[in-house]
Amino acid sequence: MSKSKARDVFCVELVDQALVYVIARSAKGAVSVAAQSGFAPDRSKKARLVDTLFAERAINRKPAKTEAA
């Protein structure tokens, strides 16, 4: 069985109270992606599910020419 494609957008709060947006399958996965990308997520708070309009601001968004493929 294959994994589903990540399509939910989460808002992750960083230690310095800044916000980053991440495309992931779960809140735990969103925090993991933010940490692997070099950000310092605040692990005492959960990532929040936000509207898909924020996908264009996500740190792990694919470039426009590969999204259509």
Image (cartoon, rainbow, N blue to C red):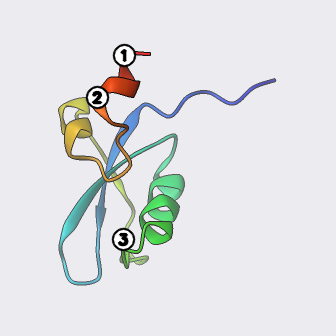
Q: To which residue does mark 3 refer?
A: 45
Distance from Cα at disc 3 to Cα at disc 2: 31 Å
Q: To which residue does mark 1 refer?
A: 68
Residue under the point 55% across and 28% down: 5
Is label 3 in contact with label 1 (beta carbons under 8 Å)? no
Q: Which amino acid type is marked by label 2?
A: Ala
- Between 35 and 45, the residue placed more toward the observer is 35
Image quadrant holding the C terminus, namely: top left
**Counting other residues with Cα less than 10 Å from the Cα at mark 2, is it few (<14), some (14-19), or many (20 or more)?**
few
**Counting other residues with Cα less than 10 Å from the Cα at mark 1, is it few (<14), some (14-19), or many (20 or more)?**
few
Q: What residue occupies the far bottom of the structure in this picture?
A: 16
Name the spot of residue 53 as percent of width and height, x first.
18, 31
The answer to whether residue 24 is above or below residue 1 is: below
The image quadrant that residue 49 belongs to is top left
Mark 3: which secondary structure? loop
In front: mark 3 or mark 2? 2
Residue under the point 36% across and 77% down: 42
Q: What residue occupies the far front of the structure in this picture?
A: 65
Distance from Cα at disc 3 to Cα at disc 1: 34 Å
Q: Which amino acid type is marked by label 1?
A: Ala
Left or right placement of residue 17 versus residue 68 in this view: left
In front: mark 3 or mark 1? 1
Mark 2: which secondary structure? helix
Q: To which residue does mark 2 refer?
A: 64
The answer to whether residue 42 is above or below residue 50 is: below
Image quadrant holding the N terminus, namely: top right
- Between 19 and 65, the residue placed more toward the observer is 65
